[in-house]
Structure formats: structure tokens, C-alpha cells
């Protein structure tokens, strides 16, 4: 059975899925069948991603539309694991849905990205998310207050190393 897993990399699609479904249904009932069906669902998702040039362009377009740039790390990873980056975009898209599909307004999600990027030291990502937060209706004061929480939790060096750059970009974007 496991010899078929390599087929996912070649996106052989429906034939592979039919063979895998046949294997899972022939196992009888019980936990193994359930696990195999769960695996099948995950494998269907992997196969559907593909790694065509169109997919690569779609990932690039997503980041450029949403953030105004495509992070260099994503560009590099697209060369080697495009399916994983496509999955990342699908996950991000699901998490970034505004109400009523999502629970939080997009501006709050962008502010969360700013705060997390400030804490982990991702200046360029935080700047992109600060611009996106302003674009989504966040005020500079809201971003500053959220960054203030990072000072409380992680100390002033976080604001000095990263937060000030993000706040500066938010001020520029708000003009």
C-alpha cells in the first residue's frame, strides 16, 4: 500500500484515488478503515493542490493582493515545495475570512499578525501586515495599543527592534 504514496508527488489524480479507495473499503470495518479514509481525505487535498505554473502564479497573486508583496521566504519555498505553499495559502485564506464566515474582522487579524511578527522579529512581515491592517480600517492608535501589549509581555526591546518600524509604516499608510 505505501508504495502508492509516492504517486502523490506526480499528481496522478483520479486513478490513484480510486485504487486507494478500493484498498480502504476492502479492509472491513473498524479503526483501520476509519484511519485510511481520513488519510484518503488528506491525500485528496494534497493531490488537488498540484504544482503547476498557474498555482505558483496564484500563490504570488494572493500575497501581492493581500499584503502588497510576496515574502522572499515564500518565493524560495515555492521553488522546492510548491504544494506546501499552496496549502499554506489555502489555510491562510480560510483563517482570514471576514465575518460572517470568520469570527474576527480582518483588521483585527492583521493586527494580530503585526503583534506576532513584532515578537518573533519579522520586521518586513510586520510592516506588510501594518499596511494591510490600515487598509482594512485599523487606526494607527489601535496598532500602537496592540504593540503596547507586546511591551508589557516581552519588554521594550521588542518595540525597539521591530515594533517601531511597523508603527512607522502604519503612520505612513494612514496618511
Image (cartoon, rainbow, N blue to C red):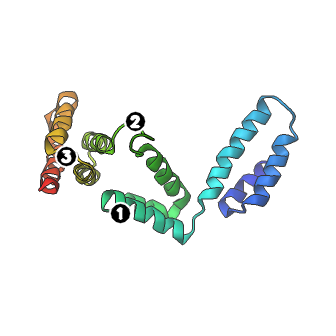
**In this picture, residue 55 sits left or right of residue 13:** left
Q: Where is mark 2, residue-wise?
A: 103
Question: In the image shown, does 170 or 73 lie closer to the viewer?
Answer: 170
Q: How many marks?
A: 3
Task: Give the Cα separation between the discs numbered 3 and 2.
Answer: 28 Å
Q: Is residue 160 above or below residue 44?
A: above
User: Residue 42, position in %: x, y?
Assistant: 65, 45
Q: Where is mark 1, residue-wise?
A: 64
Element type at mark 3: helix
Task: Residue at 84%, 45% (x, y): give it.
Answer: 23
User: Residue 145, position in %: x, y?
Assistant: 16, 35
Task: Residue at 24%, 43% (x, y): give it.
Answer: 118
User: Residue 163, position in %: x, y?
Assistant: 18, 44
Instruction: Tell us which disc is closer to us: 2 or 1.
Output: 2
Tag 2 or tag 3, which sits nearer the N-term? 2
**In this picture, residue 155 sits left or right of residue 115:** left
Q: Residue furthest bottom?
A: 53
Instruction: Tell us which disc is closer to us: 1 or 3.
Output: 1
Q: In the rendered image, is residue 72 in sight?
A: no
Q: Is residue 146 above or below residue 56?
A: above
Instruction: Tell us which disc is closer to us: 3 or 2.
Output: 2
**Tag shown at residue 162:** 3
Crowd around label 2: few <14 · some 14–19 · many ≥20 (10 Å): few
Element type at mark 2: loop
Task: Give the Cα separation between the discs numbered 2 and 1.
Answer: 24 Å
Question: In the image shown, does 158 or 94 lie closer to the viewer?
Answer: 94
Task: Give the Cα separation between the discs numbered 1 and 3.
Answer: 22 Å
Tag 1 or tag 2, which sits nearer the N-term? 1
Q: In the rendered image, is residue 11 in sight?
A: yes
Crowd around label 1: few <14 · some 14–19 · many ≥20 (10 Å): few
Element type at mark 1: helix
Amino acid at each position: 500500500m505505501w508504495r502508492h504514496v509516492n504517486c502523490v508527488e506526480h499528481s496522478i489524480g483520479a486513478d490513484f484515488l480510486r485504487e486507494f479507495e478500493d484498498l480502504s473499503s476492502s479492509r472491513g470495518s473498524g479503526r483501520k478503515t476509519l484511519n485510511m479514509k481520513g488519510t484518503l481525505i488528506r491525500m485528496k487535498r494534497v493531490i488537488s493542490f498540484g504544482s503547476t505554473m498557474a498555482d505558483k502564479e496564484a500563490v504570488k497573486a494572493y500575497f501581492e493582493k493581500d499584503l502588497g508583496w510576496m515574502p522572499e521566504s515564500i518565493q524560495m519555498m515555492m521553488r522546492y515545495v510548491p504544494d506546501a505553499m499552496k496549502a499554506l495559502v489555502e489555510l491562510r485564506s480560510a483563517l482570514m475570512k471576514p465575518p460572517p464566515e470568520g469570527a474576527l474582522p480582518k483588521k483585527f487579524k492583521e493586527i494580530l499578525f503585526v503583534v506576532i511578527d513584532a515578537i518573533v522579529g519579522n520586521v518586513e512581515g510586520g510592516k506588510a501586515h501594518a499596511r494591510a491592517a490600515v487598509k482594512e480600517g485599523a487606526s494607527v492608535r489601535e496598532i500602537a495599543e496592540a504593540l503596547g501589549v507586546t511591551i508589557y509581555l516581552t519588554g521594550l526591546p521588542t518595540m525597539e527592534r521591530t515594533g517601531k518600524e511597523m508603527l512607522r509604516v502604519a503612520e505612513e499608510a494612514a496618511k
